[in-house]
Amino acid sequence: SLSFGRHLYSYHIYSLDIYLSIMNSDYKQYKGDNGIPVVQGTQVSPARTQLAPVNMYGQEHTFPSNDHARGEKQPKKCNDAFFACFFIAHLISLVVLAFVYVPQLNGDGGDRRNLMESGQHTLTQAMTSLQSLIESKLNINIPSMHRGLEDGGYDADPTSVMIVVSISVVIAFFVSILSLTVMIQFAEGLIKFSLVFNVLLGLLTAMAGFAAQSTEAGVMGLILFGISAFYACMIWSRIPFAATNLVTASTAIKANLGVVTFAYGALILNGVWLVFWSFTTYATIYVVGDCDADGNCQNEINGFLVAALILSLYWTMQVIKNVLHVTVAGTVGTWWWAPVGANSICSPAVTESHNRALTHSFGSICFGSLLVAIVQTIRSLCESARDGDDGLCSCIAICLLGILESLMEMFNEWAFVYVGLYGYSFIDAAKNVITLFKSRGWTAIITDYIVDRVLTMVSFGTGLFTGAVAAFISYLFGLNLEGAAFLIGFVVAFILTSIVLGVVGSGVNTVVVCYAEDPKAFEDNHHELSVRMRESWRGAFPDTFRY
């Protein structure tokens, strides 16, 4: 129900934004200025700020009005340095906690402390104890990743499992890269298929519900069917627009494929962080609470300590994700304005953008990430405060917090585009995003989820394909792991493809901002894509687009 409410809210905001953008937008001929567009450290030719050019049909292009100041290169300095220092200090604090408390698990605390001796506590048991303790203190329902293996009674040859995993990784790697080419060639068809699939899925859900004599499921399916059909009809005319943005972003990423390496690195770093955080949290809570192996504690555990640890988990994961997002924004921006430095796997655009994200823009990333992490932590605490009460008020509060979290994450995505393109501080980047879309009347773009749906669908499709191949290989070589091979192949391919296409999603946001900022540069450097982009924008926004 909460998920349904959030989707209904997004559809409502989407419709309202389209209406307001059409009613309130106003464009005038661009008069030109003396500002020179700059991607951080890369100055663009002054010729790109001349008066509007003549297009291929002999008609003069009309640039959007210059009511807002276009992005400008910012001085090289460490923006929002306080938050960068705060983030580093918090990591140091976690390391200190690990050094202080983890050794005490094998210390002289008797039965309560001697938890890590051989045969007494495995990693699975440790994670189970940590899960149970946090759930008991905060009443948070934490999904268990290992229960399926424990309860299934399934024993497999470790060598066979490793063979399946290795094969799945290799297949998934090539399929995920190939998905870029597929999206470039069939972007519009994929978008149409995703919309029709959602409509049919709602209809099938309704039919299955009524067939099973479940009126509630049938009615919910009909509601989802109606919403999906209405949504598809509303945005059908915008499909060429979304497809063009998707193709442009995919082309930019394919030309700078090295940025995907940082995406894979972010995945590995997230895994390392989760393991480190889990052990540190486990040790800290057990030692501070003087707990035994069964999770029975002698001391009361401070709720603030648990909340701070949860905030640390969310904050670090947000920072890792947004460093990648800023890197992609800088790379695509360089490809937009200075393609000579952004046309190879290890192009300077990729490495320099990543370096800026970890230095001058790192404080801004930590600032914006902290805001979302705070909301995520509050939401977790509110869920724990229900204490088993699923009343209407608590459900509404959690739903509103979920919506607020989604809105903040969405806003951060656009703000970090400006951080990556120009090196703004987080506050200045946020102001520029608001001013840009207000003055241009393109606020409907912010709530456009067409591309995200396609990326998820492609990831799901590659997962099914890789899982089927892994199961077939298991059958062919007699490994007797068909079911497990399919699951492993699906999960591995879905994760790897989501990483690659997540980079494309960040690129789409950057393309939207760059085209709103400087369509002339796009025409100069990527003429064929520019012609397609111009026509798709004009078709999607016929009453407001005048370029």
Image (spheres, rainbow, N blue to C red):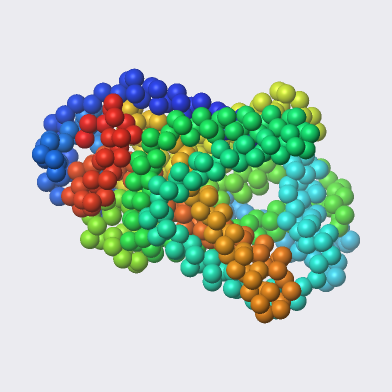
Extreme residue toward the top, this view: 23
- The answer to whether 97 is drawn above or below residue 199 in the figure is below
Quadrant of the frame with the N terminus: top right
Residue 293 seen in the current view: yes
Depth check, front residue: 54 or 513:
54
Depth check, front residue: 153 or 321:
153
The residue located at (28%, 44%) in the rendering is 533
Q: Position of residue 292 (x, y in %)?
A: 86, 55
Residue 323 seen in the current view: no
The quarter of the picture where residue 219 lies is top right
The residue located at (73%, 34%) in the rendering is 210
Q: Position of residue 41 (x, y in %)?
A: 25, 53
- The answer to whether 6 is drawn above or below residue 331 in the figure is above
The residue located at (22%, 61%) in the rendering is 340
The residue located at (36%, 51%) in the rendering is 247
Query: In the visual, does 534 lie left or right of 512?
Result: left
Query: In the visual, does 447 lie left or right of 473?
Result: left
